[in-house]
């Protein structure tokens, strides 16, 4: 099977939820898709058959993204929440899933699927968040512009606290291992670490409250450890594409 023959016989058309479900198992996130704005599928002609090799899902935008304000110069700031969301919904769509069948990866099909469907949405702005954006920058190859978030001050403080008791960033990979590591610390360091973790989690407000259902003993909370690790992991990359043929709606 020659690479050139596959990439030359590609067709991208409107898709359905069934098309997404057919390939959803190959995506790293949950396969369940609650709602969407549009779906496009990628078919490869192999012999006399058209084989589904990829799917992209566009969804409505989320409410507040700091890097959106950076990328767009705060044009949606200064409004009450209802007006702000109405403007965001008018102007922006979000890429929420890009799935390529594993046998057809490493052929540039993901960036092609993004690049060729961006204009089909007919909105001024398309955005995406990618956890692995720095490792696999296919959104950039599809003509989207990347913006990387700075490490929040609370994350820097938490990492410095861990480092002070001998826990490096490379060790923050497992909630169970982190919990065990903290339990083995000398008592004074354990108390210090628990206090830093408590302060860190409480800075997330309602997100923290959902995790601490009556048990606020942070030295023994593996769920809390998992939350900490998730916040100290790789920062997602924000991508944006501006449609030159569509003006922002106000």
Image (cartoon, rainbow, N blue to C red):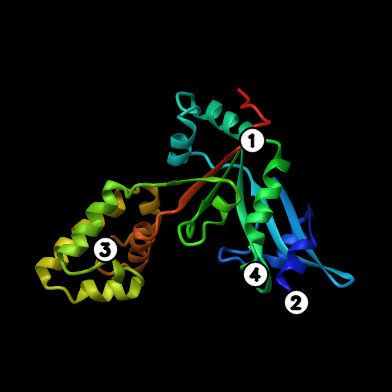
Residue receiving disc 3: 218
Front in this rendered view, residue 220 or 152: 152
- The residues bearing labels 2 and 3 have C-alpha atoms spaced at a distance of 55 Å
Task: Work out whether mark 3 precedes mark 4 in sequence or the reverse, and give the earlier one.
Answer: 4
CB atoms of marks 4 and 1 within 8 Å: no
Task: Work out whether mark 4 precedes mark 2 in sequence or the reverse, and give the earlier one.
Answer: 2
Residue receiving disc 2: 1
Task: Work out whether mark 2 precedes mark 3 in sequence or the reverse, and give the earlier one.
Answer: 2
Q: Is residue 185 left or right of residue 113?
A: left
Q: At x 15% / y 67%, what residue is drawn? A: 165
- Closest to the camera, between mark 2 and mark 3, is 2
Residue 243 disc label: 1
Q: At x 45% / y 24%, what residue is drawn? A: 78
- The residues bearing labels 1 and 2 have C-alpha atoms spaced at a distance of 36 Å
Q: Secondary structure at mark 3?
A: loop
Mark 4, residues whose alpha carbon is within 10 Å: few (<14), some, or many (≥20)?
some
Residue receiving disc 4: 25
Q: Position of residue 114 (x, y in %)?
A: 65, 51
Front in this rendered view, residue 225 or 125: 125
Q: At x 25% / y 53%, what residue is drawn? A: 156
Asked where in the image residue 110 lies, by quadrant, the reply is bottom right
Mark 1, residues whose alpha carbon is within 10 Å: few (<14), some, or many (≥20)?
some
Q: Position of residue 140 (x, y in %)?
A: 54, 51
Q: Is residue 47 above or below residue 230?
A: below
Q: Is residue 155 left or right of residue 238?
A: left
Task: Work out whether mark 1 precedes mark 3 in sequence or the reverse, and give the earlier one.
Answer: 3
């Amino acid at each position: 099977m020659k690479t050139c023959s596959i990439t030359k016989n590609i067709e991208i058309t409107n898709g359905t939820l069934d098309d997404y479900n057919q390939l959803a198992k190959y995506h790293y996130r949950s396969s369940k898709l609650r709602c969407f704005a549009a779906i496009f599928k990628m078919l490869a002609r192999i012999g006399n058959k058209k084989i589904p090799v990829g799917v992209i899902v566009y969804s409505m935008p989320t409410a507040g993204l700091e890097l959106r304000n950076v990328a767009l110069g705060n044009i949606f700031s200064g409004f009450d929440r209802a007006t702000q969301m109405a403007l965001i919904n008018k102007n922006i769509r979000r890429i929420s899933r890009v799935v390529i069948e594993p046998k057809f990866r490493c052929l540039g099909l993901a960036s092609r699927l993004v690049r060729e469907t961006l204009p089909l949405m007919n909105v001024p702005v398309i955005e995406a968040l990618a956890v692995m954006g720095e490792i696999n920058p296919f959104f950039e190859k599809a003509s989207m512009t990347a913006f990387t978030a700075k490490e929040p001050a609370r994350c820097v403080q938490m990492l410095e606290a861990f480092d002070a008791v001998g826990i490096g960033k490379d060790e923050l990979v497992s909630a169970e291992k982190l919990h065990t590591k903290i339990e083995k610390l000398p008592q004074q360091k354990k108390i210090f670490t628990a206090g830093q973790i408590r302060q860190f989690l409480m800075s997330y407000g309602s997100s923290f409250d959902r995790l601490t259902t009556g048990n606020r003993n942070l030295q023994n909370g593996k769920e809390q450890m998992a939350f900490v690790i998730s916040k100290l992991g790789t920062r997602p990359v924000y991508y944006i594409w501006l449609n030159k043929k569509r003006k922002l709606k106000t």
